[in-house]
Amino acid sequence: MAILALSVMPAIIGCGKDPKRVAVSTNAPTGSVDKLKEQARNAVTTSKGFITQQKDRWQKSYSDKLSKFDKQLADLKAKSSAAGDKARSDWNRALAQLEQKKDSAAQKLEQLKTAGTDKWQELKTHTETAFAELEKSFKDTFTSLTHDDKPSKP
């Protein structure tokens, strides 16, 4: 019986130390969890900053494009005033369509400027599409109207 008591004694003494180790090891990951939370917050902040920079750069680029379209539209309006009556009617119709598409692109750009980072990608796609349509319309209109101005050869 004494041998049994002596063999159980170290196991009991050893078991008494394990809960302290568990408590210590349980506290250690808390520091790691806090560190991970801080890293995650930093990553989110960095990501938001990057998206904001991208958004600002992109907006400036498309604002510049819109200014160029305004200038092109003014140039086309000036040309239309020099056209004959029938040609002027065609020019005015085409210019009205261009003006409408330019206004639509400008509205999309304005929506994008006021959008948060969560909606930015979706609105960016819509704005890119509107600007692509506007650019194509300008090219098509310019080609069509300047081709009509040239006298046909016999």
Image (cartoon, rainbow, N blue to C red):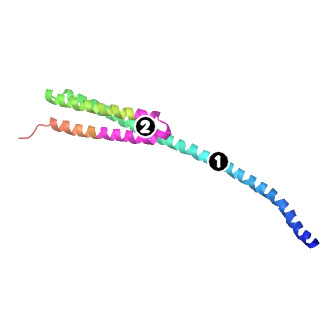
* Residue sitting nearer the eye, 1 or 62: 1
The local crowd at label 1, few if under 14, some if 14 to 19, many if 20 or more residues have their Cα within 10 Å, is few
* Mark number displayed over residue 37: 1
Bounds of the magenta span? 109-135
Determine the image quadrant of residue 26.
bottom right
- In reply to whether residue 1 is colored magenta, the answer given is no
Asked if residue 67 is positioned above or below residue 6 in the image, the reply reads: above
At 86% across and 63% down in the image, what residue appears? 12
Amino acid type at mark 2: Lys
Decide which of tag 2 and tag 1 comes sooner along the chain. 1
Task: Tell which of 68 and 97 is nearer to you.
Answer: 97
Quarter of the picture containing the C terminus is: top left
* Magenta stretch, main secondary structure class: helix
Q: Quick one: SS at disc 2?
A: helix
Callout 1 amino acid: Lys
Which labelled disc corresponds to residue 60? 2
| Residue neighbourhood size for the residue with mark 2, other residues' Cα within 10 Å, grouped as few (<14), some (14–19), many (≥20) | some
Tell me residue 153's x, y (percent).
Answer: 8, 41
Does 116 appear in magenta?
yes
Q: Say which element carries label 1.
A: helix
